[in-house]
Image (tube, rainbow, N blue to C red):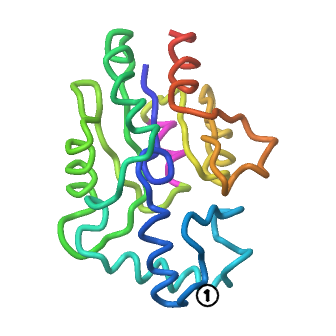
């Protein structure tokens, strides 16, 4: 069985470099430890300011190799063997724009190796847009996925035979109508219960 796991916001902390870029462009806008209430920080930033901060963040050389792992990455390290023993293959599916340095795929694989998340049953796919994940999951017969973006979950719900889950984060708690999990461990338990 194939499952898919998003990286940024699920396994890797993209919030940290993004918030640094925001405070570099707009000093003092975000306090330390700020937890956004939605994906685009609309309570603190205009759409133009969010895009400017993203553009600035994406200028970081080899950005995708520099992200800190989130606690769910540590959880997944211990769960990958159990997935492998139950014939579950993991596709790390992520949307990562090009940054200076190596390709986004090479940076992603380097990050996954550095964080002990690559195994014989894992592979990586970098998509051009988050919305392309639904198409990817359909052609690769992915049965389950976990992501932090509500729009990705909505798109993936249309894939026949696929069950997407939203990993609860501060920026998606208002999307209570979507199927969700609170941890990587909870997601993997759902997957293993269906094998």
- Please name whichever residue, 46 or 134, is drawn nearer the observer in this view of the structure: 46
- From this view, report whether residue 188 is shown above or below residue 4: above
- From this view, report whether residue 97 is shown above or below residue 109: below
Q: Quadrant of the N terminus?
A: top left
- Please name whichever residue, 172 or 149, is drawn nearer the observer in this view of the structure: 172
Residue appearing at x 66%, y 57% in the figure: 171
Residue farthest to the front?
A: 32
Q: Is residue 185 left or right of residue 110?
A: right
How would you rate the neighbour count of disc 1 (Cα within 10 Å): few for under 14, some for 14-19, many for 20 or more?
Answer: few
Where on the picture, by quarter, is residue 93?
top left
Residue appearing at x 46%, y 37% in the figure: 72
Q: Is residue 53 left or right of residue 127?
A: right
Residue appearing at x 71%, y 74% in the figure: 42
- From this view, report whether residue 154 is shown above or below residue 82: below
Q: Position of residue 58 (x, y in %)?
A: 37, 76
Q: Determine whether the residue tagged by mark 1 lies in a helix, strand or loop.
A: helix
Q: Is residue 83 left or right of residue 129?
A: left
Report which residue position mark 1 lands on. Answer: 48
Q: Is residue 84 left or right of residue 187?
A: left
Q: Position of residue 35 (x, y in %)?
A: 63, 61
Is 110 inside the magenta-drawn segment?
no
Residue appearing at x 53%, y 89% in the figure: 27
The magenta stretch spans which residues?
132-139
- Please name whichever residue, 152 or 110, is drawn nearer the observer in this view of the structure: 110
Q: How many marks?
A: 1
- Please name whichever residue, 65 or 164, is drawn nearer the observer in this view of the structure: 65
Type of secondary structure dominating the magenta stretch: helix
Q: Position of residue 43 (x, y in %)?
A: 74, 75
Q: Position of residue 150 (x, y in %)?
A: 67, 51
- From this view, report whether residue 189 is shown above or below residue 5: above
């Amino acid at each position: 069985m194939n499952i898919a796991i998003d990286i940024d916001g699920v396994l890797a902390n993209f919030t940290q470099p993004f918030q640094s870029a925001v405070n570099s462009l707009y000093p003092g806008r975000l306090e330390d430890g700020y937890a956004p209430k939605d994906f685009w920080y609309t309570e603190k930033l205009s759409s133009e300011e969010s895009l400017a901060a993203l553009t600035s963040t994406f200028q970081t050389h080899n950005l995708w190799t520099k992200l800190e792992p989130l606690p769910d990455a540590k959880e997944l390290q211990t769960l990958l063997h159990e997935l492998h023993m139950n014939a579950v293959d993991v596709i790390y599916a992520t949307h990562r724009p090009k940054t200076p340095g190596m390709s986004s795929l090479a940076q992603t694989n380097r990050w996954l190796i550095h964080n002990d998340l690559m195994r014989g049953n894992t592979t990586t796919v970098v998509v051009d847009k988050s919305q392309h994940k639904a198409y990817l999951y359909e052609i690769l017969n992915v049965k389950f996925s976990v992501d932090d973006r509500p729009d990705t979950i909505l798109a993936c719900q249309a894939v026949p035979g696929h069950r997407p889950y939203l990993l609860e984060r501060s920026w998606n708690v208002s999307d209570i109508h979507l199927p969700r999990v609170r941890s990587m461990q909870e997601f993997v338990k759902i997957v293993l219960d269906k094998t």
